[in-house]
Image: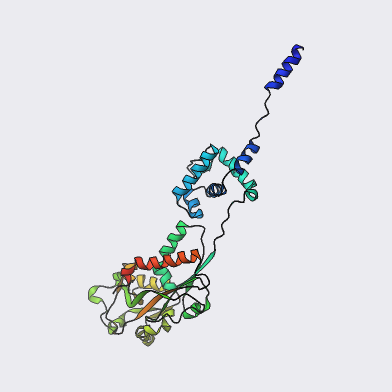
């Protein structure tokens, strides 16, 4: 055997094929648990632990634990901290590209959220439930929620929803939704009073009787014109030849009371919702009351997400129980 042959054989023996990194990451990606892969993919898209946790509807600390479990399994670091949020490391980019390519093979979970239709009387949505619904959406960015504002008896009769919250008489839920529901649940009884902004109401000039209202501009939400229990207030407004504003928007009516020295009919809890507003009791001898009712669509009452929304609404009223006490 010549020196050249021996040397060539030695060189051949020492040769090693380069590692196919793509093949390596493909096999590693295929071995990843689909749930962990889904958590990683969402986090990579969001670039933020908090937003990814909202999208997945889990707590951020739980998401971090799952990603730490994935990094331990793959023996690498997948994310690098950055001033602009989370950035994928080199290994993270490799895993992301392979997961995208293998998405159909791995059958990564895509959990379709059911569409929940929530119909709420406009003033209740604005004053009581708005903040709790915002808190829900902050926690769960994957929810599918259709919120319908009810501003008349006609709209209540026309809609179809999974959960309905409406105002009716103090002793009866009628008129209520036109579709089959669970037994209506009373949530709170509301007393209504004329209200004025505190900054426009000095104690010495505060109206004590109906005659004193002659010097004030009255504002009325047109929705209230058909409410039988509001007849004392509606009669007063109808008798006015001047100094009356009729509005189709509850929010705008409330803003006019706050900022325009107007007097408007509002729920008795309003001073708790807005400390700048003041109720004017004793102007009317006849009480003006309504009851808040809630019902769940009979066809979707067993749905977990529907029950979650109903419980959120009940909790919102329970938390504000003192708002509704005389």
Instruction: Judge from the rendering whether residue 62 lies leftward or rightward of residue 233; answer left or right.
Output: right
At a point 43% along the width and 60% down the height, the residue shown is 135
* Residue that lies at the very extreme toward the top in this rendered image: 2
Q: Is residue 48 above or below residue 243?
A: above
Marker count (numbered): 0
The answer to whether residue 157 is left or right of residue 97 is left
Give whichever of 248, 3 is nearer the camera.
3
**Picture coordinates of residue 127 (x, y %)?**
39, 69
Quadrant of the snapshot with the C terminus: bottom left
| Residue 97, x across and y down, in percent | 62, 44
Rendered position, 6 above or below 185 = above
In percent of width and height, residue 32 lies at 57, 44
Answer above or below: position of 181 versus 101.
below
Q: Quadrant of residue 250?
A: bottom left
Q: Nearer the viewer, residue 13 or 47?
A: 13
Residue 97 visible in the displayed image: no
**Rendered-image quadrant of the N terminus:** top right
Quarter residue 249 falls in:
bottom left
Which sits in the foreground, 48 or 319?
A: 319
Question: From this viewpoint, which residue is outermost toward the left?
Answer: 204
**In this rendering, position of residue 56 left or right of residue 324:** right
- The image's colour scheme reads rainbow
Judge whether residue 321 can be spotted in this image: yes
Residue at the location (34% across, 71% down)? Answer: 270
Q: Residue at x 76, y 15 (%)?
A: 5
The residue most toward the front is 302
Q: Viewer-proximal residue, 321 or 135? A: 321
């Amino acid at each position: 055997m010549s020196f050249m042959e021996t040397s060539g054989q030695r060189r051949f023996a020492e040769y090693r094929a380069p590692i196919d990194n793509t093949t390596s990451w493909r096999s590693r990606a295929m071995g990843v648990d689909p749930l962990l892969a889904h958590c990683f993919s969402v986090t990579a898209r969001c670039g933020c632990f908090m937003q990814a946790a909202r999208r997945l509807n889990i707590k951020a600390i739980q998401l971090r634990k799952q990603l730490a479990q994935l990094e331990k399994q793959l023996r690498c670091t997948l994310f690098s901290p950055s001033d602009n949020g989370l950035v994928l490391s080199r290994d993270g980019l490799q895993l992301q590209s392979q997961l995208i390519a293998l998405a159909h093979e791995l059958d990564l979970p895509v959990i379709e959220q059911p569409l929940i239709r929530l119909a709420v009387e406009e003033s209740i949505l604005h004053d009581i439930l708005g903040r709790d619904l915002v808190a829900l959406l902050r926690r769960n960015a994957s929810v599918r929620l259709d919120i319908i504002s009810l501003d008349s008896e006609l709209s209540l009769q026309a809609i179809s929803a999974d959960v309905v919250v409406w105002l009716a008489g103090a002793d009866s839920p009628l008129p209520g939704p036109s579709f089959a529901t669970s037994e209506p649940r009373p949530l709170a009884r509301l007393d209504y009073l004329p209200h004025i902004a505190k900054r426009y109401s000095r104690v010495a000039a505060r109206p004590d009787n109906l005659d004193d209202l002659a010097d004030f501009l009255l504002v009325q939400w047109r929705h209230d014109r058909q409410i039988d229990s509001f007849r004392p207030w509606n009669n007063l407004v109808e008798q006015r030849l001047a100094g009356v504003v009729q509005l189709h928007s509850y929010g705008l009516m409330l803003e006019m009371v706050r900022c325009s020295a107007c007097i408007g009919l509002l729920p008795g809890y309003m001073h708790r919702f807005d400390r700048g507003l003041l109720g004017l009791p004793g102007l009317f001898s006849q009480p003006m009351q309504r009851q808040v009712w809630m019902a769940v669509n009979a066809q979707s009452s067993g749905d977990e997400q529907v029950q979650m929304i109903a419980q959120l609404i009940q909790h919102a009223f329970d938390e504000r129980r003192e708002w509704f006490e005389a």
